[in-house]
Amino acid sequence: MPPETPTAVVLPQTQYPHRLRDTLPTMYDLPSEDPEEPGLPDTFHDDQPQLLRETFQPPGYIPDRYFMGSDLNLYYDVNHFTWHKRPDWFAVLGVPRFYDGHDLRMSYVMWQEQVAPYVVVELLSPSTEDEDLGRTQHLAQQPPTKWMVYEQILAIPYYVVFSRYTNAVQYFVLTDGRYRAIQPSGQGLWLPQAGVGIGLWTGAYQGMTRPWLRCYDAEGVWIMTPAERAEQQYQRAEHEQQRAEQQHQRAEDERQRAEHEQQRAEQQHQRAEDERQRAEHERQRAEQQHQRAEDERQRAEHEQQRAEQQHQRAEHEQQRAERLAAQLRALGIEPES
């Protein structure tokens, strides 16, 4: 759950009549930068606001209904057209992303926009530290200090100050018209209307590993940058591809195993067929041998019968001869030997 923060009291914004607003200078008329202004951006002043820009994603707002600016002139006094502040990063809720619905903003002009920033982040540098932390005294006849503008004139509900030299973060919440420093119990400052938080995260961004301010969601999860989402999608796609390749490999292994099993089954079937044919051959050979033995038996039996017939004929001839001899002797004739 997001940490609880004191309810900020937002001062009412100045409402300018349409007729008056139509005659006031717009961002096209006002200068968008001042080369002599102290605290001009360095590399960190480019990268840190960009990380906030990429991770500040209010879930209750479509991208066209909130605006983020970094190092952009913020004009706040209709009576002094040249007075402005230049926040390192700020976010406004409920305004179009593009000025007048179609153009990129060159500055943020309060009397045209009518909506003050919801949160401002300042990055400390030696030349702006006193101004950012409200230590600068307001001099008569001089523009109000940055602290006065954020706190009293624009009544910006949330103000965050970050030092890249000490990595210290200071959070301020507007309470009863004054900024009060708080120490959040969670990972950072929760912005209830935006539905996101801002906290200190340590990691690699733009090739540099260090503490950075970035946004997190209601579950305490750091909101990803487009590059991180693309990397996550790439890794997910790569993982899916690897999984598909693994599945394909498993399917190929299964196919080869099935093919091997089929070949083994065919080999076993072939061996069984060979055994069957060999057994059939042995049966046929046994039948042939049995038939030859039967033929031999029958031939031997035939020979035996023929021998018996010959023996019987011989006995018959002998008996006939003996009868003839007996008849001759009965006639007194001695048969020849």
Image (cartoon, rainbow, N blue to C red):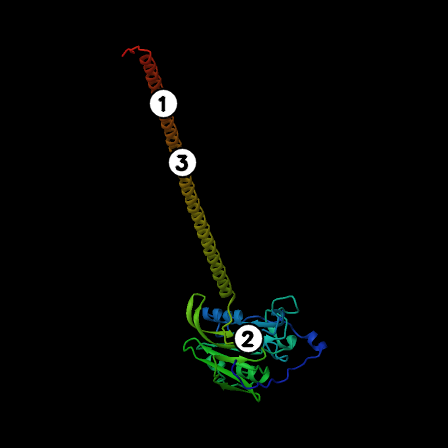
Task: Report the mark closest to the observer, 1 or 3.
Answer: 1
Please tell me whether mark 3 sits on a helix, a strand or a loop: helix
**Disc 1 from disc 3: Cα separation:** 45 Å
Dividing the picture into quadrants, the one containing residue 104 is bottom right
**Residue 143 visible in image:** no
Q: Residue at x 54, y 86 (%)?
A: 6
Mark in the foreground, 1 or 2? 1
Q: Earlier in the sequence, mark 1 or mark 2?
A: 2
Q: Nearer the viewer, residue 236 or 169?
A: 236
Name the image quarter holding the C terminus: top left
Residue of label 1:
312
Q: Residues within 10 Å of mark 2 (few under 14, many from 20)?
A: many
- The secondary structure type at the circle numbered 2 is strand
At mark 1, the secondary structure is helix
Asked if the residue at tag 3 contacts the one at tag 2, i.e. Cβ–Cβ closer than 8 Å, the answer is no
In percent of width and height, residue 325 lies at 32, 14
Q: With respect to residue 304, does 214 lie above or below?
A: below
Residue occupied by mark 3: 281
Q: Earlier in the sequence, mark 2 or mark 3?
A: 2
Q: Residue at x 57, y 82 (%)?
A: 157
Give the residue at the far right of this rendering.
19
Q: Amino acid at mark 1?
A: Gln
- Percent across and percent down for residue 12 are 64, 84
- Residue nearest the viewer, comparing 59 with 263: 263
Relative horizontal placement of residue 34, taking residue 303 as reference (left or right): right
**What residue did someone put label 2 on?**
90
Q: What kind of residue is marked 2? A: Phe
- Residues at marks 1 and 2, CA–CA distance in whole angstroms: 143 Å
Task: Farthest residue to the bottom: give it.
Answer: 176
State which tag comes first along the sequence, 1 or 3.
Answer: 3
Classify residue 278 as left or right of residue 199.
left
Q: Nearer the viewer, mark 2 or mark 3?
A: 3
